[in-house]
Image: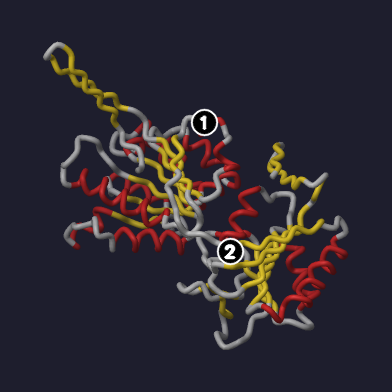
Amino acid sequence: TIPTNQLKIRREMQNQISELTYNHELKFILNAPIGSGKSTAACEWMTMKARSTMNNITSKVYRFIVIVPTVNIAYDFYNKITHSSRLLIAPSMLDRFVCLCVKDGAFEDFKKAVINKISIIITTYSTASRCLGSLVEASVNQQNINVGSYSLIIDEAHMLLNNISLIEIIRDFVDVGLISATINDVSSLSIFKDFHIIKPNVSTQYKRNLFIHQLNKDDEKMRKDVIDLIHRERANYDKVLIKIEDKKQGQLMKEALKEVFNVALYNGDKKDVEINGSGKIYDKYDENRTIDIIISTSTIQSGQSLTENVLQIFIQTPIDTISSVEQFIGRNRLKNSTTHLFMRLTKDKCNVRQSMNRYEY
């Protein structure tokens, strides 16, 4: 279970009973596999706690600011909360219970939600990076803005390494919860050393066929290695998904493949394809058009689940971490899947660099 905010100790001695209550910080990392229902469980828990505050059932005030990677995931959280079996509030009160702050220039909406003490505020990494620090600063000088009364819940918390400003903002909150399937990169940071790690028992099992290749330092030879692999294996799969964080290299890969295959890009700047609720990838402009190969950055890893028979190819770049590999492999929800990893290998160990640290696995 997710930690509570109090520790009660009951002592019985010589027919006397004493009970002491200690308040403690609610700091936890919910670490469970991809696809195990972490976000659903978190939404149920937040809904139950926030509703208890709204109904004056508990003396502890539970309000939440929820930070997620993308607007689509923000709407997904909103829908889970508004359709939760634990909600049980009148529809007329819904706007007082939960709201979305995801628009450009969302600072005023964010500020208004805090002033009105909305129980659950859902926003994105991008919006939180721009707005939350200013709200924390404003709460010091304005009595009607109390950001400190909120607990901070961060989904896909491994992405904090790409949002350093949010790591600093975390220091201003007493109660913080992180949600991620891959916590190795962030759990070792000193700011999270006192966090309680929750690892629920999950029975779901996947068979992952992993093939590790030496990454050629010459970009042209690297592309040739990947293209040769695609020509050998393409007929056995519905689609091929290539993940490479370097957009320039991704474009060059597309140019090298487009004469033979229908190739689409999926990154922060250009999304030629979309992924529907069933985990199927289709052409954004023509659903009937066959897509052979998708070349993507980590954008495709933000809460997406793939259910097609996809050949996955990971090409390591200097900014990739252990989480990058684990998240990419875990996107495939088939019971049996195959991923080829093109990695820099040193003495049978795979080194992944993040900032000035090195991780080995």
The answer to whether the residues at label 1 and label 2 have Cβ atoms under 8 Å apart is: no
Task: Tell me the SS state at disc 2.
Answer: helix
Q: Which residue is drawn at 47% across and 37% down?
A: 170
Residue corresponding to mark 2: 300
Residue corresponding to mark 1: 193
Residue 185 sits above or below residue 90 on the image: above
Q: Which amino acid does label 2 sit on?
A: Ile
The total of numbered circles placed on residues is 2
- In the displayed structure image, the side of residue 229 where residue 183 appears, left or right: left
Give the position of the C terminus as an image quadrant: top right
**CA–CA distance between discs 1 and 2?**
30 Å
Horizontal and vertical percent for residue 85?
24, 60
Task: Tell me the SS state at disc 1.
Answer: loop
Horizontal and vertical percent for residue 126?
51, 52
Q: What residue type is labelled 1?
A: Lys
Q: Which residue is drawn at 51% across and 47% down?
A: 157
- The foreground one among 185 and 96 is 185
Horizontal and vertical percent for residue 309?
60, 75
Horizontal and vertical percent for residue 150?
34, 40
- Crowd band around label 1 with a 10 angstrom C-alpha radius: few (<14), some (14–19), many (20+): few
Give the position of the N terminus as an image quadrant: top left
Residue 19 occupies quadrant: top left
- The foreground one among 113 and 271 is 271
Q: Which residue is drawn at 38% across and 53% down?
A: 122
Residue 76 occupies quadrant: bottom left
> In this figure, which colouring scheme has been used for the structure?
secondary structure
Between disc 1 and disc 2, the foreground one is 1
